[in-house]
Image (spheres, rainbow, N blue to C red):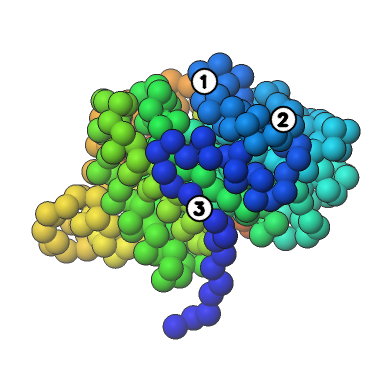
């Protein structure tokens, strides 16, 4: 067996209503003044209310940063870190989706390490201390609450990553009640994001390992069994709970066995056209799966049983085809299938998209089960634009 490392959050609390315990949890980190990183819509929906009340009851000062955009920008992150330094904040809490949590990770780091984000983009360049960090997801999707990764949108509309164990939070707090009001479209998009995390972690070429495999398998089983349920009935707390658990497990899997071409092709769609990350993934997912099939057929065959309980194995080619077909069916049933044209992308945009996707060659594409060059990436985008049969890249 080849050697591997596996890193995970030291503390995870999973409980309906857990956000009401945040005040006591912060006291455990000796916090006297906490910065809450959230979004205006999240706060207006009342999703931070219990946490804010618990923080007040614990006698902890609170500063709120709601200046968060769908894709965190370097300006927003650096400004929030400056607020921490000016106000004497000694802990950072985030309640929100992946963008809010990604922002909070970097704010907690930069508050203790004044400087520019440009200095820490890449792998293991953030090596200093940070403030105590607690993350509370309001979507079942990104898994950011347990990962060492933060994705940033640069002023040049590129997506760059900061990857470091220093970004793994001290505590992930999973309260499924906070996901009950998520609209069907966002439920579907974030859910597909988590599905992609599990698939790419399990089929990755570079850091695939037995622990990530087990988390990915369990995550994929939970997510695919419940995504249609929560899309059609968002009030199903049990299904919401299983989605949230699946999302976290997928996050732990891909934090240690990284994602690949689906994410690499999705990033430019999100950065250039302001498309949500989950939807960006969904729009290219079936086409990347089909491209990868020659190299990942046996692994896809294994996953066919996971996402279709009772499925009777036939042969690797048939099982892999059944797996891809079921993933496409889930996307279609949850309203996240379709053409790139639906988000404003045209034929003239494909070259730029392919160029930007290839910038992920050393971080993401290197982990893809099948190698990709510029022409193959562009062909995948072209198929996703046409909405026809997935590109095989031959």
In the visual, does 82 lie left or right of 109?
Answer: right
How packed mark 1 is, by other alpha carbons closer than 10 Å (few <14, some 14-19, many 20 or more), is: few
Which residue is drawn at the image coordinates 53% and 28% (left, top)?
A: 50
Q: What is the CA distance from the residue labelled 3 to the residue labelled 1?
A: 23 Å
Q: Nearer the viewer, residue 174 or 23?
A: 23
Q: What is the CA distance from the residue labelled 2 to the residue labelled 3?
A: 23 Å
Residue 341 position in % (x across, y down) = 45, 22
Circle 3 sits on which residue? 12
In the visual, does 296 lie left or right of 119?
Answer: left
Q: Do the residues labelled 1 and 2 touch (CB within 8 Å)?
A: no
Circle 1 sits on which residue? 46
How packed mark 2 is, by other alpha carbons closer than 10 Å (few <14, some 14-19, many 20 or more), is: some
Q: Mark 1 or mark 2, which has the lower sequence index?
A: 1
Tag nearer the camera, 1 or 2: 2
In the visual, does 351 lie left or right of 201?
Answer: right
Residue 302 appears in view: yes
How packed mark 3 is, by other alpha carbons closer than 10 Å (few <14, some 14-19, many 20 or more), is: some
Q: Nearer the viewer, residue 32 or 118?
A: 32
Q: Do the residues labelled 2 and 3 touch (CB within 8 Å)?
A: no
Which residue is drawn at the image coordinates 33% and 51% (left, top)?
A: 220
Q: Which of 338 and 223 is in front in this view?
A: 223
Tag nearer the camera, 2 or 3: 2
Question: Mark 3 falls on what kind of element?
Answer: strand
Q: From the viewer's perspective, is residue 251 above or below residue 182?
A: below
Q: Residue furthest bottom?
A: 1
Q: What is the CA distance from the residue labelled 1 to the residue labelled 2?
A: 16 Å
Circle 2 sits on which residue? 62
Which residue is drawn at the image coordinates 79% and 56% (left, top)?
A: 129
Residue 373 position in % (x across, y down) = 54, 52
To which quarter of the image does residue 213 belong? bottom left
In the visual, does 167 lie left or right of 250?
Answer: right
Q: Mark 2 or mark 3, which has the lower sequence index?
A: 3
């Amino acid at each position: 067996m080849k050697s591997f490392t596996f890193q995970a959050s030291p503390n995870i609390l999973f409980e309906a209503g857990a956000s009401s315990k945040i005040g006591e949890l912060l006291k455990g980190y000796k916090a006297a003044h906490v910065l809450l990183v959230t979004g205006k819509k999240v706060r207006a929906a009342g999703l931070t209310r219990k946490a804010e009340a618990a923080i007040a009851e614990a006698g902890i000062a609170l500063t709120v940063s709601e200046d968060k955009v769908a894709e965190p920008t370097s300006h927003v992150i650096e400004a929030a870190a400056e607020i921490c330094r000016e106000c004497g904040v000694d802990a950072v809490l985030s309640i929100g989706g992946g963008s809010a949590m990604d922002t909070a990770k970097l704010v907690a780091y930069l508050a203790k390490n004044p400087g520019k984000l440009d200095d820490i983009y890449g792998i293991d360049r953030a090596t200093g201390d940070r403030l105590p960090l607690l993350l509370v997801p309001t979507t079942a999707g990104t898994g950011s609450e347990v990962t060492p990764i933060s994705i940033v949108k640069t002023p040049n509309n590129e997506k760059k990553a900061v990857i470091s164990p220093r970004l793994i939070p001290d505590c992930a707090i999973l309260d499924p009640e906070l996901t009950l009001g998520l609209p069907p479209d966002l439920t579907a998009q974030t859910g597909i994001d988590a599905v992609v995390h599990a698939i790419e972690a399990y089929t990755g070429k570079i850091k695939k390992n037995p622990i990530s495999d087990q988390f990915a398998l369990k995550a994929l089983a939970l997510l695919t069994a419940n995504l249609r349920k929560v899309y059609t009935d968002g009030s199903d707390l049990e299904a919401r709970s299983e989605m949230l658990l699946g999302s976290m497990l997928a996050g732990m899997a891909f934090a240690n066995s990284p994602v690949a071409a689906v994410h690499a092709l999705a990033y430019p769609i999100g950065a250039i056209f302001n498309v949500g990350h989950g939807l960006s993934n969904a729009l290219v997912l079936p086409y990347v799966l089909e491209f990868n099939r020659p190299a990942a057929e046996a692994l896809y065959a294994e996953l066919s049983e996971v996402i279709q309980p009772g499925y009777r194995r036939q042969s690797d080619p048939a099982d892999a085809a059944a797996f891809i077909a079921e993933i496409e069916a889930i996307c279609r049933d949850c309203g996240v299938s379709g053409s790139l044209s639906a988000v404003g992308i045209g034929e003239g945009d494909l070259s730029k998209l392919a160029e930007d996707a290839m910038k992920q060659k050393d971080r993401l594409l290197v982990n893809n089960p099948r190698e990709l060059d510029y022409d193959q990436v562009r062909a995948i985008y072209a198929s996703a634009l046409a909405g026809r049969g997935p590109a095989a890249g031959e």
